[in-house]
Amino acid sequence: MSKKLFCFGYGYSCDFLGNALRKQSDWTIAGTTRDSDKKALLQQSGVKAYIFDYSKPLSDVKLFLKDTTHLLISTPPDDEGDPTFLMHGEDIAAMEGIEWIGYLSTTGVYGNRNGEWVDERSELRPSSKRGTRRAIAEEQWLSLYERYGLPVHVFRLAGIYGPGRSALDSVRAGVARRIDKPGHVFSRIHVEDIANVLMASMAKPNAGGIYNLCDDHAAPSHEVIDYACQLLGLNSPPLIPFDAADMAPIARSFYNDNKRVHNERIKEELGVQLLYPDYKSGLLACMEWEGRESLVAEHQ
């Protein structure tokens, strides 16, 4: 039987998932974007795309969602929560034939733990506006499971990277800096591993389930930049003490949270084996991907 994935907020992670699904079997892929140019590009790639600018509901949401079996939400929330839920939560609750719903959240909902471990049972203590908004959105989407029994799943993502969006790119662009805040670590997740976890959940739905998505090796950001420089054959930028670093407030805020995130649930419950369990394997894969893309471009 053919399946249909509809993504509210068809961005980087959704695109990798959609491409992976189409390689597997007979899938229709659809989704929304706020940009008319991106809508045209998505349609050229075979995605049924619609404009959703978050200021008003979709013009004919029932038609657009028709025959959807799998629904993914990746729209950024505001202080009121998730715009997709606020405008179309009731439409989604009334859908027939829905087999799986996923909401992409963030590990930022756990807040700062001073380097200690958290798992999916840990209390939510967001310490930033971004984390607070995600916690509100999680509660909204899980309410559809609690009220209607819809197959809602929440995925708390660490820092996303992958081809075209990694430390390699920031180093090449000349904007990478090695900030040293002793004892501070970040968790990450490669975009291909995100797609694999989501497909594993689709194959084994567990309504109301919450999953952390991160690799096995939380690490300081300056180590990642240093390794990216090694791969590129470039000298690493100097190490800058955090207190002396001139950073925009939003960049500095990412250093407020310091935690290590357990990822055992995706392995034990969903049987996921991470393709890139640490940043070194992930960045190396990004380099190899770029090499393949260059070869393809040369022969076109």
Image: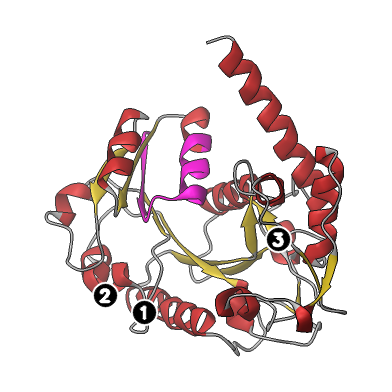
Q: CA distance from mark 2 to mark 3?
A: 29 Å
In this picture, residue 138 sits left or right of residue 59: right
Q: Is residue 283 left or right of residue 293?
A: right
Q: Which mark is residue 188?
A: 3
Q: Within 10 Å of the Cα at label 3, are there few (<14), some (14-19), or many (20+) other Cα atoms?
A: many
Classify mark 1: helix, strand or loop: loop
User: Does the image show residue 278?
Assistant: no
> With respect to residue 62, does 24 lie above or below?
above
Q: Are marks 1 and 3 in contact (CB under 8 Å)?
A: no
Determine crowd level at label 2: few under 14, some 14-19, many 20+ residues with C-alpha closer than 10 A. some
The amino acid on which the numbered mark 2 sits, given as a three-letter code, is Leu
Task: Estimate the x, y position of residue 175 in percent, counting from the top left.
Answer: 66, 56
Q: Can you identify the residue that label 2 sits on?
A: 86
Asked whether disc 2 touches disc 1, contact meaning CB atoms under 8 Å apart, the reply is: yes
Q: Which residues are magenta?
A: 1-20
Among numbered discs 1 and 3, the one appearing first in the sequence: 1
x 48%, y 77%: residue? 134
> In this rendering, is residue 282 above or below 212?
above
